[in-house]
Image: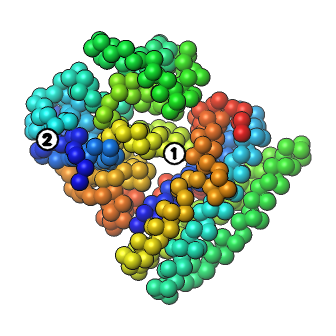
Amino acid sequence: MEALRIIQEEHQSLAAILHAVRFMLKEIKAGRLTPDFGLFKAMVHYLDAYPEKRHHPKEDDFLFARLKQRTDEGAEALARLEHDHTGGEGRIKALEAALLSYEGGEPDGLEITARAFDDFAEFYRNHMILEEREILPLARKHLTQEDWDAIDEAFRTEQDPMKGAAGEDFRAIFSRLVAAAPPPIGLGSGPYKG
Amino acid sequence: MTTSILEIRDLCVSYGKVEALHNANIRVGEGQIVTVIGPNGAGKTTMLSAIMGLLDSRGELDFDGKLRLAPEVEDMVAAGMNLVPEKRELFGEMSVQDNLLLGAFQRYRSGKRDQAETMEEVYGLFPRLKERREQMAGTLSGGERQMLAVGRALMAKPRLLMLDEPSLGLAPLIVREIFRIIAELRRRGVSILLVEQNARAALQVADYAYVLETGEISMEGPAQALADDPRVIEAYLGLGGKHQDMLAT
């Protein structure tokens, strides 16, 4: 069940990034931090390239596909998760548009951006809860050893769990985000250098 | 099965009449990450302290193929074991670089002169420490202090590194980075014994795991098997997880 470990690890990385963005926006609102737009954009890029383009397709193609072959249980939840996965591009565009308005000096730019990230976080929270509470237990229950061997192999061989298909090294990107984020959430060596 | 770098058998530690650790049996294979999870007060820190020779204990301790009775801290460091304590225990009035050098003191005393090279390796793992090498350790952020504590332990070139709650008090972003570095240390051949309350993160990075409850090992197995065990899920992982809670609006 290596695939489950990878999925949960990726959920944690995603949640950590979202936690950091929202923390920074809150501090900016309180006047204790100035925005680092380079860092915000890099974090949005990570949210786009990592979960939307990499994490979700793996789940759809390997885990969900096998589960559907084994059981009808959880069909509604699976349909919802797959529907969620198709909306990735729109969600990212909403974040980018909000950031652009903020960077461009729109009067409500900060508010709009904070709300966009709150919505994104809320979406992902519900998505993860559904996946981890309903689908992963069903996968543990219904999938056979043969299924797991195939799924684990697919997750492992697709690439290094943090390497992007386009050759992006997500480990290195993640480390740069951690380094540039301000304390106490990061190491404070910003502004972000891509 | 890999060769053992550490094996403890029937390890017991008492504080007065209270037995804080009872007949603990743990094995760490060469190049493995082994984690001990459990609630507060289960005896996790006590166990690491006893292994390191910081507390009196009973039982057998086999490190690197040699039986060590009543281990002493200095002997264990010289033999290739080191501990990153929960409270970091840095010297706040000393620079980052000097704190690192202190970690190499025993090697220096025994005639080894590879400190500069080792420091570059540490800086390679933690570029932020290099940027801040002249800064007083007391002025570092929590994440930087944890990195310095790990870096200082690595200056002794340990073969077994024991980490006591490395994620404690750190923001999620830094916790992820610390665990990435722990995995990187394994790739570099360092064996790791990791004590953590953050069971989810610990089980993800570890090869093998033990559950310690009220001073006794209650479960053990490959980390992934424990992560999938309903009893561990219920007691330590919950139905959701901290990563979901941190997204609450």
User: Of the residues shown, which amino acid type is indicated by label 2?
Assistant: Leu
Residue A26 is at least partly visible in this image: no
Chain of the residue that carries numbered disc 1 in the rendered image: B
Q: Residue A128: x and y, percent? A: 56, 65
SS of the residue at dot 2?
Answer: strand
First along the sequence among labels 1 and 2: 2
Q: Is residue A116 left or right of residue B28?
A: right
Q: Which mark is residue B176?
A: 1
Quadrant (top left/top right/bottom left/bottom right) for the N terminus of chain A: bottom left
Chain of the residue that carries numbered disc 2 in the rendered image: B
* Residue for badge 2: B11
Q: Which residue is drawn at 44% across and 27% down?
A: B151
Judge the density around disc 2: few (<14), some (14-19), many (≥20) Cα neighbours within 10 Å. many
Residue nearer the viewer, A108 or B98: B98
Quadrant (top left/top right/bottom left/bottom right) for the C terminus of chain A: top right
Residue A113 is at least partly visible in this image: yes
Q: Residue at x 33, y 16 (%)?
A: B112
Q: Which residue is drawn at 75% across and 46% down?
A: A41
Q: Residue B55: x and y, percent? A: 19, 29
Residue B88, quarter of the rendered image? top left
Task: Work out which residue is located at the far bottom of the displayed protein and give it.
Answer: A72
Whether A159 is drawn above or below A68: the answer is above
Residue nearer the viewer, A156 or A107: A156
Q: Residue A19: x and y, percent? A: 61, 48
User: Of the residues shown, which amino acid type is indicated by label 1?
Assistant: Arg
Q: Is residue A103 left or right of residue B133?
A: right
Whether B164 is drawn above or below A118: the answer is above
